[in-house]
Amino acid sequence: MGWEEKFAFRDCPWCGLTNTKLVPKSVNQECANRDGQSRWWATLGCPACGSAVLIEHTAPNVSWPAPLRVIPKGIEDETEIRHLPDDVKRYYLGAVRVLQVGVPDAAAVQLRRTLEAAAAHYGIKEKVLMKSIEKLIADGHVTKSFEPLLHHIRVVGNVGAHASDENVDQATAEGALRFTTQLLRNLFEVPGELEALQKPTSVEGLPPAPGGGPA
Ligand SMILES: [Zn+2]
């Protein structure tokens, strides 16, 4: 047992190829640690981009074979943001997915919508995104240092949305995705973690964390 063929059905974490089967090159590879305990690995190749993917799997003698970890992680794992509201997550993951399949224009538009949804979550629904961004900053939800990044995402989204000679390239869209990830951490992950800290289970004697969660 150990390795099972079904573990090979997965997206390529390098190029984002979906609904595919990676090609097993070598499976049930045993590596012992300093205490003599074995770990088991499989090496697979992506048929599209030729990258190697490493999967740690359960030992050949266990009755419940399973993959334990995949290296590298895919873009969705790397961009995971805690406490992200579902309405914002929908657009954000949409951007991640279309970027994976190489449609940067569509990703740029989804990132712009992500900003709109994030602002709406804070009760800001201006007609023009520029105004919503200004209000997010004025209300103190985002620090002013984010301002140029927010406008960058907005402008990239505009280029993606309009048919013209100008296109959004993959690198620009990936940059906008990184900025958006930072912004969403600032807007949702940090307040969410602070809120979790303030739950009654927190350690006695520690002062409560400052600030509150999103409205
Ligand atoms: Zn690939």
Image (cartoon, rainbow, N blue to C red):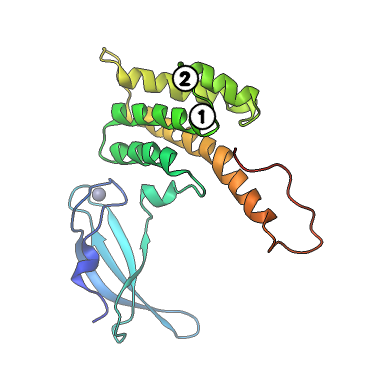
Which of the two labelled residues, at mark 2 and mark 1, occupies the earlier sequence position? Answer: 1
Split into 4 quadrants, where in the image is the C terminus?
A: top right
Above or below, comparing residue 71 to residue 109 in the picture: below
* 80 and 36: which is toward the camera: 80
Q: Which mark is residue 13?
A: none
Q: Callout 1 environment at 10 Å: few (<14), some (14 to 19), or many (20+)?
A: many
Residue 174: percent from left, percent from top:
39, 34
User: SS for tag 1?
Assistant: helix
Question: What amino acid type is highlighted by mark number 1?
Answer: Ala
Residue 140, by quadrant, is top right
* 189 and 35: which is toward the camera: 189
Q: For this view, does 194 lie left or right of residue 178?
A: right
Question: What amino acid type is highlighted by mark number 2?
Answer: Leu
Q: Callout 2 environment at 10 Å: few (<14), some (14 to 19), or many (20+)?
A: some
Name the residue that disc number 1 marks: 119
Above or below, comparing residue 72 to residue 94 in the picture: below
**Contact (CB < 8 A) between labels 2 and 1?**
yes
Q: Is mark 1 within 8 Å of ligand 1?
A: no
For the point 33% across and 38% down, the residue is 94
- Mark 2 and mark 1: Cα distance apart in space: 9 Å
Name the residue that disc number 2 marks: 129
Split into 4 quadrants, where in the image is the N terminus?
A: bottom left
Residue 98: percent from left, percent from top:
29, 37
